Structures are given as C-alpha cells and as structure tokens.
C-alpha cells in the first residue's frame, strides 16, 4: 500500500490529499529524471520497497503520468496514463492479487494522474515557465533489515531533474533546497494530520506491505543465497563492438571489466546499468569498441567478478562459429570469474 500524495496548491488555505494505494518496480525506471541512490541492500537481509511517480509535460509520445512499484530491484506493478490500467509485472504478483486489487490500483492511478498533471502546472508558474519539457517525480519507500529488525523510510520530490522537497523522517518535517519549494514545505510542515499520516505510513503500513510482497515472491527472489552468472561474449561482425553479458546472477553486486594484455583497460568501454530479470536474478553488460587490427594484435579479457564462482570453458556462451577459438576461460581466486578470449580471429 502506498502513502498519501498531497497536491501542491497555490492556495495556502487548501491542502487536499489523494489517498493512493499503489506500488512499483522495474529496470529502475528508464525514464528517471533525478537519481536517488539506494545502495543499502545487503544479501537477503536488507529489503527495499521503492515507488516512483513521474509526471511529464511537453512530450507528446510519452505518458503524462506513470507509477511503478518495486521490491529490491524487481518491478512488480506498473501504471501509466496511456494504458489507463495497473498491471502486474511479476508472475508472483499476478498470482497473489485478484481483479479487485488491480481495479482499485487502476482507479487510484487515474486519480493520481490528474493530481500530478496539476502539480506540474503549478510548478511551471512558480518557476516562471510556459513552454518546454517539464517533469515532476516522487521517489519514496521503506527498508526492512530482516536480521536486525531495523526499518527506515525515505521520500524525495524532484522537479526538472533537481531536488524540490525532502522528507526528514527523524524530524518529521519537509525541507526544500529551492525557494520555489518553501511554500509547499511550510504548508505541509504545518499540516500535523499529513505528517502523522506519513509517519504511520513509513513506520507501519509500508513495512507491512513490504513483508507481504516478500512473502508473495519468496519462492523466487528471496530464497537465493548465491547464483552465479551465465556469461556470453557477443559480436555482430568483425568491426562491431564486443559485448560481455552476464545474466541470471544473485545477489546483485557484480563487476564487469576489461583487460588488455593482462592490464586494466578502460578506453572505449561502456558499462550498462544493472537490470532485473523476471525470476528475481539480475543482468549486466559491458561493451568494448576496438578496431579489427587492434583486436588481432592484442589479447583482451572480460573480467566478471561475483561471489564464489569459477567457470569452465564449456560454460561460456558465445556466438562465434568456432567455439575452440578465440574464447577460453581462466581461473581466478575466490570472488573473481575471468573469461579470456584471444583475439587471433574476430567473433562472427
């Protein structure tokens, strides 16, 4: 269940609340306009429930409003103003909640769309803006440490990629780093009912729903201890970039890097973001761009670091026709998995 969402209203005598019962998850939503780093997750013990609401104006082919819900890094719910429907994103959520739940989330999403659409217009006035692309985004949620029982909550509001409001749960007050947010912070800080509702949500309601969702997906994402990655080396043609792709691993902490002639190599390397799989495991990729000549005259290595795994040559997947060359595997100590491939011929 989600917290209440307050309308940003220019009338200082009117604060109205829209009660929202939604939840979110995905590829840590690809259309994120500001970043909130949440890296306190630890294997199995610390579990994060995160929600993202995004409103957009000035882009005709993108939904005006989206809401997403996630547990750790797995998206389980999605709604946007184009499809006008809340949908499950995991099989365990699809099986655990019935039609009434999704109908309710759909109606809540439709109502929230109007609230956030209005909030964008209000903020455009405060920032003296009339045209262009503008965004309002709220990221909030809670964290439960299954080992210590400690709980934490967080909420951050952003406008056009910058912080607009931050909720300090210890002091139970809103803080704004910009002048245009002072009015809203003052109003909400003087609304004791709103603050008490937020406190109850983060300390109780959010944690209860987090534990409920964990139970829903327990057979999949929270029974893992360590699952090692499957690694593929892929190249479309001899002149194309080479991608080292690791997938199916758990926990999510992984490092993919490249070596050239046994030395660390960072030039022309692009590391992709961590992405979730449907089964609760994760995937990540790193791509290197080198010329065929450089490829031919040097030895390049993709290094995948994950917990407790050593891979044999038979386990390495590649789209090369001749699997005996140029790919081979190497052995490393404890927490490192290295996949070596000699560039005596390009991958095809």
Image (cartoon, rainbow, N blue to C red):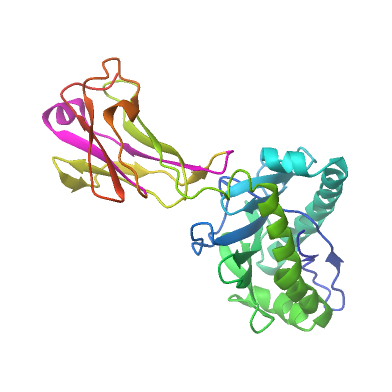
- Residue 270 visible to an observer of this rendering: yes
Residue 14 place in picture, x, y as percent: 87, 74
Horizontal and vertical percent for residue 168? 63, 78
* Rendering coords of residue 13 (x, y %): 87, 78
Quarter occupied by residue 312:
top left
Horizontal and vertical percent for residue 331? 22, 40
Which residue in the rendered view is the most extreme toward the left? Answer: 297
Q: Is residue 137 above or below residue 246?
A: below
Q: Quadrant of the C terminus?
A: top left
> 3 or 82, which is in the foreground?
3
Residue at image point 71% right, 72% down: 203
Quadrant of the rendering where the N terminus is positioned: bottom right
Residue 287 is inside the magenta segment: yes
Q: Is residue 341 above or below residue 331?
A: above
Residue 136 is a magenta residue: no
In the displayed structure, does residue 89 sit left or right of residue 260?
A: right
Report the label total.
Answer: 0
Left or right of 48 in this view: 273: left
Residue 87 appears in view: no
Looking at the image, residue 142 sits to the left or right of residue 186; the answer is left
Give the magenta part as a residue range.
278-306
Taking the spot 69% from the left edge, 62% from the top edge, the residue there is: 124
Vertical placement of 35 versus 101: above or below? below
Q: 52 or 233: nearer the eye?
A: 233
Nearer to me, 330 or 166: 330
């Amino acid at each position: 269940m989600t917290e209440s969402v307050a309308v940003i209203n220019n009338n200082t005598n009117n604060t109205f609340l829209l009660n929202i019962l939604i939840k979110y998850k995905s590829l840590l939503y690809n259309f994120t306009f500001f970043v909130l780093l949440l890296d306190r997750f630890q294997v199995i013990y610390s579990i994060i429930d995160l929600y993202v609401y995004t409103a957009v104006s000035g882009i005709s082919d993108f939904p005006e409003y989206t809401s997403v819900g996630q547990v750790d890094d797995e998206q389980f719910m999605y709604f946007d103003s184009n499809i006008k429907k809340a949908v499950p994103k995991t099989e365990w959520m699809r099986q655990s909640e019935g039609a009434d739940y999704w109908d309710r989330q759909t109606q809540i999403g439709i109502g929230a769309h109007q609230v956030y659409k209005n909030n964008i217009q209000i903020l455009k006035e405060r920032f003296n803006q009339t045209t262009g692309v503008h965004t309002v985004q709220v990221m909030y949620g809670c964290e439960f440490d299954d080992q210590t029982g400690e709980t934490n909550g967080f909420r951050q509001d952003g406008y056009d990629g910058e912080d607009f409001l931050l909720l300090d749960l210890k002091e139970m007050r809103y803080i704004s780093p910009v002048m245009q947010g002072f009015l809203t912070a003052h109003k909400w800080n003087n609304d004791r009912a709103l603050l008490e509702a937020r406190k109850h949500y983060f300390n109780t309601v959010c944690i209860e729903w987090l534990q409920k969702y964990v139970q829903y997906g327990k057979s999949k994402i929270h029974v893992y201890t360590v699952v090692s990655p499957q690694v593929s080396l892929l190249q479309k043609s001899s002149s194309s970039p080479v991608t080292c792709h690791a997938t199916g691993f758990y926990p999510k902490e992984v490092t993919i890097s490249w070596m050239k002639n046994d030395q660390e190599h960072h030039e022309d390397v692009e590391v992709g973001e961590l992405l979730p799989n449907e089964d609760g495991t994760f995937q990540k990729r790193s791509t290197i761009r080198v010329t065929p000549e450089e490829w031919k005259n040097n030895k390049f290595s993709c290094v995948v670091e994950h917990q407790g795994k050593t891979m044999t040559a038979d386990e390495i997947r590649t789209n090369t026709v001749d699997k005996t060359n140029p790919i081979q595997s190497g052995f490393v100590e404890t927490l490192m998995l290295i996949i070596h491939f000699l560039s005596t011929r390009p991958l095809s």
